[in-house]
Every structure is written in C-alpha cells, then in structure tokens.
C-alpha cells in the first residue's frame, strides 16, 4: 500500500477539465506546464482519460448543462481522487455568478480539495496549489 501512495505522490496524472469559463485559466494552466514554471518536474502528467487520472483540474463555473457531465467524469476517476479548482469562476462562479444557468463553483457538483483563486491565477499560484495538493497527499 505504501508503494501505491508513493507512486501517486511522485507522479500524479491530471485531467484538465474546462466547464465553460473564458479560457483565461486554460492559458495559465498551459503556461504552468511549459518549461518556465514546469509542473512536470513534480511528475505531473497530463491525461486525456478520466479513468487514468488521479487529479481533476477544473476551470469555469458549474452550469445546469455541465453538472451531470462533471459528476459522471468525477465518478470515472479511480479512488483516491482529488479535485483542484483553478480561477475565481471555478471557486465561486466569479463574474458568472447570478446568471440564470450558473449554479456556482465546482464544489456545487463535486468535492474540491484545493482552491487556486485568481482571475486568471498566474502559473506560480497554480504551482503553489499543486504543492499544497502534494502535501495533502503525503498526509493522507
């Protein structure tokens, strides 16, 4: 069991999920993956399938249309699974708060482990959120 925990800490696989924000956070997440910030030095690997991911990185608010899809994707991720909300839209619905079809932040549909606020957050804040998540993984 300790070997599996060690492997998850040293190489978390990430699913990037945008639920309909302005794409500002997408650009910052990609910047965090680039050589200047390089979150890959922590072993993070971007995955295209939720069945292979350990961590879901979410941007954008939860809308009525996306709620069921996000829950389905969350259920497809194997245990233990973690969720990181990036940007003020994912944390609190941001500028979309109060719109007729917006329910709120990501935590209105699925449980969130780490919040990275900002509109959009810079790559250093995203790296800090990743470090907080890895610390949380070590403690669990």
Image: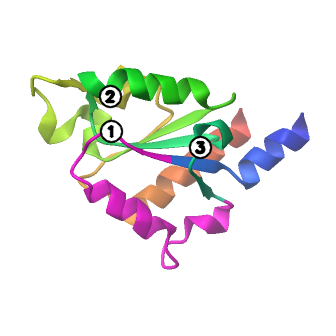
- Whichever of labels 3 and 1 marks the residue nearer the N terminus, that label is 1
* Callout 2 touching callout 1 (CB < 8 Å): yes
- Judge from the rendering whether residue 25 lies leftward or rightward of residue 9; answer left or right: left
**Residue that lies at the very extreme toward the bottom in this rendered image:** 36
Which quadrant: the C terminus? top right
Q: Residue at x 26, y 58 (%)?
A: 24
- Judge from the rendering whether residue 38 lies leftward or rightward of residue 5; answer left or right: left
Q: Residue at x 19, y 39 (%)?
A: 94
Asked if 87 appears above or below 104 in the picture, the reply is: below
Which quadrant: the N terminus? top right
Residue at which label 3 appears: 49
Q: Is residue 37 magenta?
A: yes
Q: Where residue 58 appears, x then y in whole percent?
A: 41, 42
- Whichever of labels 2 and 1 marks the residue nearer the N terminus, that label is 1
**Residue that lies at the very extreme toward the left in this rendered image:** 99
Residue at which label 1 appears: 19
Q: Residues within 10 Å of mark 2 (few under 14, many from 20)?
A: some
Query: What segment is highlighted magenta in the picture?
Result: 16-43
- Secondary structure at badge 1 equals loop
Question: For residue 88, what is the image quadrant?
Answer: top left
Residue at which label 2 appears: 66
In 3D space, how far apart are the residues under numbered discs 2 and 3 (Cα atoms)?
17 Å
């Amino acid at each position: 069991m300790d070997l599996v925990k060690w492997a998850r800490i040293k190489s978390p696989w990430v699913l990037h999920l945008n639920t309909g924000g302005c794409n500002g956070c997408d650009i910052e997440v990609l910047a965090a993956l680039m050589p200047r910030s390089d979150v890959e030095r922590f072993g993070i690997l971007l995955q295209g399938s939720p069945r292979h991911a350990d961590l879901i990185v979410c941007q954008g608010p939860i809308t009525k249309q996306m709620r069921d899809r996000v829950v389905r994707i969350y259920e497809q991720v194997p245990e233990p699974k973690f969720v990181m909300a990036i940007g003020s839209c994912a944390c609190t619905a941001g500028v979309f708060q109060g719109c007729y079809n917006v329910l709120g932040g990501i935590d209105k549909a699925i449980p969130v482990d780490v919040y990275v606020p900002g509109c959009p957050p810079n790559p250093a804040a995203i790296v800090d959120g990743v470090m907080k998540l890895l610390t949380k993984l070590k403690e669990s």
